[in-house]
Amino acid sequence: MADIETAKLTFGDKVIDLPIMKPSVGPDVIDIRKLYAQGDVFTYDPGFTSTASCSSTITYIDGDKGELLYRGYPIEELADKSHFLECCYLLLYGELPSAAELEDFEARVTRHTMLHEQMQYFFRGFRRDAHPMAIMVGVVGAMSAFYHDSTDIGDPWQREVASIRMIAKMPTIAAWAFKYSIGQPFVYPKNSLDYSGNFLHMCFSVPAEDYVVDPILSRAMDRIMMLHADHEQNASTSTVRLASSSGANPFASIAAGIACLWGPAHGGANQACLEMLQEIGTVDRIPEYIARAKDKDDPFRLMGFGHRVYKNFDPRAKVMKQSADEVLGLLGIDNNETLKVAKELEKIALEDPYFVDKKLYPNVDFYSGIILEAMGFPTSMFTPIFALSRTVGWISQWKEMITDPEQRIGRPRQRYIGAPRREYTEIEDR
C-alpha cells in the first residue's frame, strides 16, 4: 500500500502530519479532523471559504475556468439538450435516466403536485401583504404537520417520498404564495402540463378565462430552474446540511434553506439587481451610476455583475442571456424603461475596460431578473422561484449527507475574544 501523502504543520515545538486527500477533480484537500486532538489548536476560516465541510459527488464548480458540472455533465450541455425534471433525476440519483425511468419519475412528480386541502387555511392565516418568501418558509416548515408518513429520515422509502413531495409541491406553494399576495384565487395544478408550464399556469391563469402557456416562456422558465438547481456548498445548501445534521425532518431542513436563501446576498441577488435597474430609471442616467460604481469611496455597487466563485465568467449567464433574448423578442418589449436600462448596461459592461479588466461580466442574476420581469413577475417572486428551483439540489445534498458515514452533527468552532473568567460582583458593589 502506497504511503499517504501528508502536509506538515509546524508551530512551537509541535510537528503534525496532516493527510492530503485527493478529489476526482479540483484542488487537494488537507484533512484537519485530528488537528485539535493532536495540536490543541483550531483553524480560523470566517465564512468557511477555504474549508471543505463534506465530501460530495453532486456538483463541481471551477471558478477560474467558469465551469459548472452536475454529476459531471456541463451545465451548458444540459441546458441545451435536457430539461429540468431530467436534471432533477440526475441530481437525485447520480445518472441520467433511461426513457422508462424518466417517464416513471415524471409521473410520480406530476401526481404529487397538489397540496393537502387544509393547507389553504394555513395560507389564509398570513397577512395579505406578507412577502411570498415568508409564506414559503412557513408553509414548507409546516409540511411536517401534514405529511407525517415521510418524516422518518432513517427510512429510505420515507426519504424518497419526502423528496418527491417537495419537488412536486414547491411550484404549487410558490404559485399560491404569489396568488395570495395579489388577491387572486388559488389555481390547482394540471397534470396535462409539464413542470415549468404548470407553474406558469398556476401563477397567471384565472378562473374567468383560458390561459395557454407559451412554449418559449415555458422553456425559459425551465432553463431558469435548471440553471439554479444546485450550486455546490453555498450558504443555503450548507444551511440545509447543518440543519439536517441534527436529525431534523426533511421539511424543516428545506425550510431552513429557504430562510437562508431569502438574503439579498444569496437568493435575493436578482431582485436586488432589478431594483438597482429601477433605481437608475432611464438610459441617460447610466453614466452617472457607472461613475459611482467605479468610485471606491461611493457605497453604490452594481448588482448582477461578477460572481464570488466565478473569476472568469458565469457559465449559467451565457445560457440565460440566450433565453432573455428569446423572451424579450417574443414579448416585443421595446418601451419598458427598466429593460432598456438593462440592455444598455449589459452593452457597456461587456465593452468598458474597467468591467472587462475586473471580469465584471453580467451574471445569471442579471439575466434571470430581466426574464422574470418581462414575464410579469413582481420582484417579490424572484427569490421564491429561486427556492423552488434549488429544492432538488437541497434534497440531493440532504440525501447524500444522510447516508454519508463520515457526517457528524455540525459544530463549528470559534476564536473567543471576549472577557476571560471573572468573578460575579454583587449588585450593591457595582
Image (tube, helix red, strand yellow):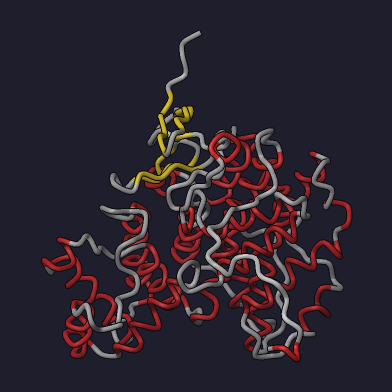
Where residue 288 sits, quadrant-wise, is: bottom left
The quadrant of the rendering that contains the C terminus is: bottom right
Where residue 188 sits, quadrant-wise, is: bottom right
Residue in the foreground of this view, choosing between 333 and 321:
321
What residue is at 61 percent from the left and 46 percent from the top? 397
What residue is at 77 percent from the left and 55 percent from the top? 248
- Can the viewer see residue 23 in this picture? no
- Can the viewer see residue 350 in this picture? yes
Left or right placement of residue 25 versus residue 169 in this view: left
The total of numbered circles placed on residues is: 0
Image x and y of residue 71, in percent:
50, 37
Residue in the foreground of this view, choosing between 63 and 217:
63
What residue is at 48 percent from the left and 27 percent from the top? 19
Image x and y of residue 62, in percent:
36, 44
Left or right placement of residue 122 versus residue 78 in this view: right
User: Compared with residue 183, is residue 390 higher up or lower down, i.e. above or below?
Assistant: above
Image x and y of residue 325, in percent:
31, 66
Left or right placement of residue 374 versus residue 384 in this view: left
Residue in the foreground of this view, choosing between 154 and 246:
246
